[in-house]
Image: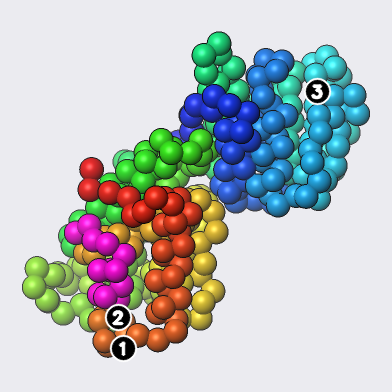
Amino acid sequence: MSIYSDSTLEAPTSEETRVSGRSLAKSLYDQNLIILLTGELGAGKTTFAQGFAEGLGLTDRVQSPTYALENQYERLTHIDLYRLSSEQAKQFLDHSSDVHGIKLIEWAERIDRTVIGPHIHVHIDDRRDKRIIHCDFLDHPVPDEHEIDAWIRDVRLPAHIERHIRQVTAVSDRLVAQLQKRFPTLLRRQALHAAARSHDLLRFVDFKTYHPDGDFNPSDDDVRRWTELKIRYGTPHEEAAKTFLTEHGYSVIGDIVSTHSGIDLTGTKTPITTEQKLLTYADKRVLFDQIVSLDERYADFIKRYGKGEENEQHRKWLSMMKNIEREFFPDGSPDVTS
């Protein structure tokens, strides 16, 4: 069964509202999408829109298009329906449907959201003592726990990989909680959780051998199933999982999972979105099923993949991980044990 991501946070000041808008721009997976913005007059919708535009990298300052109805920028069309009736708003949007890129629509209360199709809905509730921003990511579905559990059983995931997945999921959940306490960050919580739970779903396609090793003692049925999946989805396991998840209707979860190695030896797998970065970082804070520091994980990385010798690509890998850590946790490495 599919669910959708949502995010709720407090943004008491205009600057925090702007920051939350910037954060939304880092959680997008489409070049063409609709974002609906609702809230009372003076709630901070235009301030949020300005932050969102900044997050997209736009240099032009976004102004409220109340009287012009629509302002167009590079990659963004900003629409304000305040002065229109519901019928006028519908007609206006019908005529602007051929505009490509991101549409950010203020006063979306004027339209029937049920006929919009996939979209993101941001509601700003400006109360006397605080401002609450709630975001529903209704553009991409997320697999629920039962569906992921069924996948794990179907692929016959090795127990030690499942233990690693559980620990990475716990770490990523804690990172989200800590991040949102520090900064008003909108992100796809449920999507990140699902990606963490499925990031190593097909890890076995990269196994060099299926021979017994310690507590790893696969059955003939295990090996047969893994061989089938390796033939079908190929390698490496990140791309295999992306293909699997996309095939099951969860392309965004596949996108998040696809970059969790951090960087491959060609330097092409770079995490960009907030969810991609947090999953990558969470994965690098877990060695097997134990929480470790980045330096400890790096030492193991060199031992296993560099045969004890580090090179420039390895150093880039560590630098990227530490840059992600500083981006989200500038005061130092977060405690992800609880």
* Residue type highlighted by circle 2: Ile
What secondary structure is the magenta-colored segment mainly?
Answer: helix
Neighbourhood count class around disc 2 (C-alpha, 10 Å): few under 14, some 14–19, many 20 upward: some
The residue under the point 12% across, 76% down is 212
Q: Magenta span has 191?
A: no
The residue under the point 69% across, 45% down is 54
* Residue type highlighted by circle 3: Leu
Q: In the picture, which quadrant includes the N terminus?
A: top left
Residue under circle 3?
A: 81
Image coordinates for residue 268, horizontal then vertical, percent: 54, 74
Q: Secondary structure at mark 2?
A: helix
Image coordinates for residue 99, horizontal then vertical, percent: 83, 44
Which of the marked residues, 3 or 1, is nearer the chain's N terminus? 3
Image coordinates for residue 11, horizontal then vertical, percent: 54, 28
Observer-side mark, 3 or 1, equals 1
Label of residue 302 in the image: 2
Q: Secondary structure at mark 3?
A: loop
Q: Is residue 205 left or right of residue 96?
A: left
For the record, the magenta segment spans: 289-301
